[in-house]
Amino acid sequence: MGMDLNGIDLGGRVAVVTGSGRGLGLAYAKALAAAGASVVINDVDRAVVDAAVAEVPGSVGVAAAVGSAETADRLVGAAVDAFGRLDVLITNAGILRDRVLWKMSDEDFDAVIGVHLRGTFTCARAAAIRMREQGDEGRLILISSPAGQRGNFGQTNYAAAKAGIAAMARTWALELGRAGITVNAVVPVAATEMTKTIPAFAPVIEEAERTGTPFPAWLRRDEGLGTVEDVTGLIVFLASEASKDVTGQAIGIGGDRLALWSHPAEKSVAFADGGWSAAAIADSWATGVGAAPETYGIPAPKAPQ
């Protein structure tokens, strides 16, 4: 039986974590194992998988790119073959192909959608089939992103995939509720190879890595950005019995910050008898429904002056 410092016991639970050879995925796998779970590690690179399996006690590894139904079946099969069941799926695998719209190729778009969106779909489908056959509860934990909630410059493909993942979480929470399978989207912010390139963050992250000093409070609180380990508490909670009543949610975590993201809802409504003409919309927009338009894009980080 395993027990992490937070007192959450995942003993007997079996988890698949896609894209868990390094970065956030590896941190998730380590935290689940430390809490007592058995873990299937996955990465595209066999050497990376082998190195991760050596770091995560009692784990097994599958080297494969997510996206295809075949890989999804291999991952679920690996869990069942090694550990007899599957309780938790974390769809973390992802790639970036950032370009502005007018420079983004079909290949850039398809590659990112294939790994993030299709990979989440195929893996979740295979996991849901297995969990429903087992006849007891399960956990689908889908990794989304602030880009999927807000949009982000240069990330047509990534933002669309991550928004789609949040939409799938809401849909699957409806479909799988009767089977006792919860589905949530996690919106993590952490210092990874991806976020180190953000200009406001780069020098602070480099300094922390060089000296071993913790990130400053403004970064951990105001920006909600910390280490990959800061994200793992939410993952362990969502994998556990303690989260059995939490489903259909998008939950943000990073640094010292835990947040519940809102879902889209009608913000302002107006009625016109007989319907709306273009001219009537034009006349009333700025003072009516459109008086307080929504913001868009991830706000630029602000380091204290």
Image (spheres, helix red, strand yellow):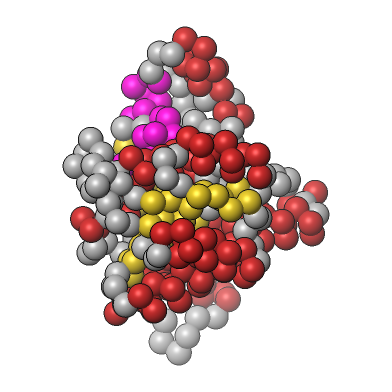
Nearest to the observer: residue 128 or residue 160: 128
Q: Position of residue 233 (x, y in %)?
A: 31, 42
Q: Is residue 86 depicted above or below 15 in this figure?
A: below
The stretch in magenta equals: 215-234
Q: Is residue 151 depicted above or below 193 in this figure?
A: below
Rendered image quadrant of residue 249: bottom left
Residue sitting at x 71%, y 46%: 97
Q: Residue furthest bottom?
A: 274
Q: Position of residue 90 (x, y in %)?
A: 45, 55
Nearest to the observer: residue 248 or residue 182: 182
Residue sitting at x 50%, y 72%: 125
Task: Say whether residue 52 is magenta.
Answer: no
Say whether residue 164 is left or right of residue 139: right
Q: Characterize the magenta stretch by its predominant secondary structure.
A: helix
Q: Is residue 296 depicted above or below 178 in this figure?
A: above
| Numbered-mark total | 0
Q: Position of residue 161 (x, y in %)?
A: 58, 59
Q: Is residue 21 depicted above or below 120 in this figure?
A: above
Q: Position of residue 199 (x, y in %)?
A: 59, 25
Q: Is residue 172 among the parts visible in the rendering?
A: yes
Which quarter of the figure is the C terminus placed in?
A: top left
Residue sitting at x 63%, y 51%: 63
Q: Is residue 143 among the parts visible in the rendering?
A: no
